[in-house]
């Protein structure tokens, strides 16, 4: 992943409500949630939710699919994992991270 793409994705997540929307979609799984169900679950007005979904979609973190007259949104797990991979690419000075990650933090301090 290129730095510019990471910046766009991180910027989209750098808002409390958008992060909440994205996390809800991640929890919902690949089937996603309808826009109405998402708005109701998060207690967000439809225009506000639409604004946040547009930002997340523009960043490539959310996918939309139409089913009849409903639009379902789901997290783009490949994009999410690419972002996480970018952030942890050189973690712990090249050593495997995991259980020993606490040691890496001590070394970095």
Image (cartoon, rainbow, N blue to C red):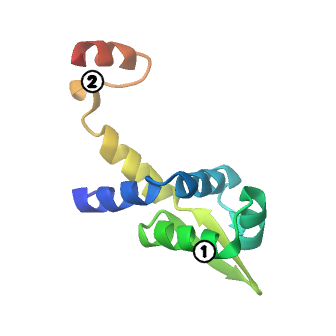
Q: In which quarter of the image is residue 46?
A: bottom right
The image position of residue 16, as x and y in percent, is 53, 51
Viewer-side label of 1, 2: 1
Nearest the eye: 70 or 30: 70
Q: As drawn, is 108 to the left or to the right of 72? A: left
Q: Is mark 2 on a helix, strand or loop?
A: loop
How many labels sit on residues? Answer: 2
Nearest the eye: 92 or 18: 18
Q: What residue is drawn where x is 24% and y is 14%? A: 107
Residue occupied by mark 2: 95
Distance between mark 1 and mark 2 Cα atoms: 42 Å
Q: Which of marks 1 and 2 is nearer the N terminus?
A: 1
* Mark 2, other Cα within 10 Å: few <14 / some 14–19 / many ≥20: few
* Mark 1, other Cα within 10 Å: few <14 / some 14–19 / many ≥20: some
Q: As drawn, is 56 to the left or to the right of 106? A: right
Q: What residue is drawn where x is 48% and y is 54%? A: 15
Quadrant for the C terminus in the image: top left
Q: Is mark 1 on a helix, strand or loop?
A: helix
Q: As drawn, is 9 to the left or to the right of 47? A: left
Q: Is residue 96 above or below residue 87?
A: above
Residue occupied by mark 1: 50
The image position of residue 7, as x and y in percent, is 30, 57
Q: In this view, does 38 lie above or below 27?
A: below
Q: Quadrant of residue 64?
A: bottom right
Q: In this view, does 96 lie above or below 66?
A: above
Q: What residue is drawn where x is 23% and y is 28%? A: 94
Q: As drawn, is 88 to the left or to the right of 71? A: left
């Amino acid at each position: 992943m290129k730095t510019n793409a990471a910046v766009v994705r991180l910027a989209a997540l750098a808002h409390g409500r958008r992060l909440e929307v994205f996390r809800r979609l991640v929890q919902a799984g690949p089937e996603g949630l309808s826009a109405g169900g998402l708005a109701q679950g998060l207690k967000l007005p439809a225009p506000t939710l639409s604004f946040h979904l547009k930002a997340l979609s523009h960043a490539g973190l959310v996918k939309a699919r139409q089913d009849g007259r409903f639009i379902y949104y789901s997290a783009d797990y490949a994009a999410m994992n690419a972002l996480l991979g970018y952030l942890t690419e050189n973690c712990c000075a090249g050593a495997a991270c995991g259980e020993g990650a606490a040691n890496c933090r001590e070394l970095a301090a």
